[in-house]
């Protein structure tokens, strides 16, 4: 995954999205991100859903403790999730 821009705050209109949220240590976080992105993209393919923008959301940033992260992708309409 290529980083297009540095950190920023961006205000957007509400969008539907699907995501996977987890807590992980800072060390190794990018490996966890990559694994979850692959899982998310595979799930979207299985559901035959077209995705929009993919993202990494940091709910809690603690470089010495647990990070609360979410990987996601925008979709055009609400979708029921699963496990």
Image: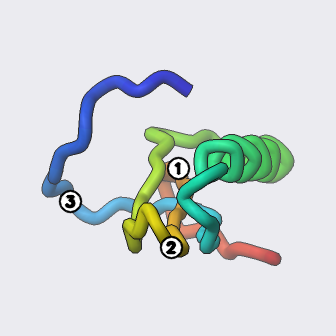
| Whole-percent x, y for residue 54 in the image | 50, 42
Rendering quarter of residue 30: top right
The x, y position of residue 59, in whole percent, is 40, 71
The residue at the point 65 percent across, 50 percent down is: 28
Residue at the image point whose x is 52% and y is 49% from the top? 73
- Element carrying mark 3: loop
Q: Quadrant of residue 15?
A: bottom left
Mark linked to residue 73? 1
Q: Which residue is mark 2?
A: 65
State the residue at coordinates (61%, 73%).
23
Select label 1 or label 3 by which is in front.
Answer: 1
Please provide percent x and percent y for residue 64: 47, 67
Q: Is residue 83 above or below residue 17?
A: below
Residue picked out by circle 3 = 13
- Along the viewing direction, whichever of 38 and 76 lies nearer the viewer: 38
Q: Are marks 1 and 3 in contact (CB under 8 Å)?
A: no
Can residue 57 be seen from the camera position used here?
Answer: yes
- Labels 2 & 1 near each other (Cβ < 8 A): no
In the picture, measured across the screen, residue 49 lies left or right of residue 73, that is right
Residue 22 location, quadrant: bottom right
Image quadrant holding the N terminus, namely: top right
Q: CA distance from mark 1 to mark 3?
A: 15 Å
């Amino acid at each position: 995954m290529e980083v297009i821009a540095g950190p920023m705050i961006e205000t957007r209109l509400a969008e539907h999205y699907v995501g996977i949220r987890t807590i992980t240590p800072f060390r190794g976080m990018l490996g966890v991100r990559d694994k979850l992105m692959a899982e998310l993209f595979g799930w979207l393919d299985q559901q035959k859903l077209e995705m929009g923008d993919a993202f990494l959301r940091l709910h809690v940033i603690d470089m010495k403790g647990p990070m609360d992260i979410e990987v996601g992708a925008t979709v055009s309409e609400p979708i029921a999730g699963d496990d």
